[in-house]
Amino acid sequence: MSVKKVVLAYSGGLDTSIIIPWIKEHYAGAEIIAYCGDVGQGDDLEVVRRKAIATGASKCIVEDLRESFIRDYAFKALSAGAVYEDNYLLGTALARPLLAYRQAMVALEEGADALAHGATGKGNDQVRFEVTYAAFAPHLKVIAPWREWDIRSREQALAYAEKYGVPVDQSPRDLFSRDGNLWHLSHEGGNLEDTWNAPLSEMFKLSVDPEKAPDTAQVVTIAFEKGTPVALDGKRLGPVAIVERLNSVAGAHGVGRLDLVENRLVGIKSRGVYETPAGTVLHLAHREIERLVLDRNTLHFKQTISVRYAQLIYDGLWFSTLREALAAFVEFTEQEVTGEVRVRLFKGRAEAIGRRSPRSLYRQDLATFGEGMAYDHGDAEGFIRLFGLPERVRALTRERQPETVEK
């Protein structure tokens, strides 16, 4: 299939930087439009734009997606309590559907006949990009160079970049593969490929070593309205500002580090080290408010929903019918999730030390062990008899001995 115009998901990193000359070499005559979505990765996007043009793109479209990323993706996952395999807060997985969606929209607007990305054939991102492409631009060809070219390592990629005069940030001494946005920074590769090796201290960017964190704890107060963070320490802030501020504050106390061996969708295990200071604090605070305001049955059922919700995000199925249906359930339950949580930050730990809500189901006159109790202990007797009735009946049937049958 001949290709005339390609829209490439472009970050300016090693992989996508060498993809531009590679496509020009293998898809002769194809025009390449680089697409870069700003999700808070911290790069100088004007430099990224110039780099894309200098390496062969006809133009580079840059969009500010930070507000949408936090409001419509990260905070939606937060409300759902979506945490993959008990630990991973899904920083990369949450950004990909937004980036792929906008890339597909640009391709349709530009009249392109192909979409391209720099995800490897071993990773999850290839699925996340291409499932989203299929949902919005199923007729466009997908170019995934890592599944086509003969480059098999970071060292070879660096050599290819040198050959074509493509400037990159990595060097043979810094071979970590990183993905960053407002929600997190991930690190893979390098010495982390041996699961026995400890992460290098110099690798971390968003958080200080907990041992070197301040010797004095700091308490932050987070306010939620209908499951969404709206204020920090009494000051109402937008989604981006809350995350930026918490990243700075919690990161300074060494909060949000995670060293994880996870199960990739493609069937292999991988090791990643993640820094998610704001997300770690917000997930903790959100869980505490939910425990205060949701009844037992709803809370327990929502916990099962959270696991499935996280898997759908991880697997690249953000735009699936099931994810959207579960989101409707979450939106309904979150109507009650309003209140404040105080979180103590100290030496890499975040712990809730106070919570309150106008929707709280906690009643001090019911929970107290002191005088003035509204709870009648005598009511428990009848409840226990009925609650344990099936077990009582079963025990009575076991007391019967089978009759002996004479032969």
Image: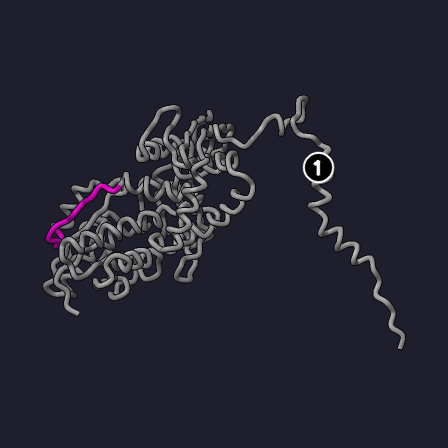
Q: Is residue 248 above or below residue 23?
A: above
Q: Is residue 100 magenta?
A: no
Residue 171 position within the rendered picture, expressed as x and y whole percent measured from the top left:
26, 50
Quadrant of the drawing holding the N terminus: bottom left
Q: How is the image coloured?
A: one colour
Is residue 344 at least partly visible in the picture?
no
**Quadrant of the image occupied by residue 156:** bottom left
Q: Mark 1: few, some, or many residues within 10 Å (few <14, many ≥20)?
A: few
Determine whether, in the image, residue 271 is placed left or right of residue 362.
Answer: left
Quadrant of the drawing holding the C terminus: bottom right
Residue 331 position within the rendered picture, expressed as x and y whole percent measured from the top left:
41, 42
Q: Which residue is drawn at the image coordinates 43% and 27% (left, top)?
A: 221
Front one among 334 and 385 = 385
**Quadrant of the image occupied by residue 263:** bottom left
Which kind of residue does numbered mark 1 sit on? Ala
Q: Which segment did they paint magenta?
A: 54-65
Q: Is residue 203 above or below residue 254?
A: below
**Quadrant of the image occupied by residue 254:** top left
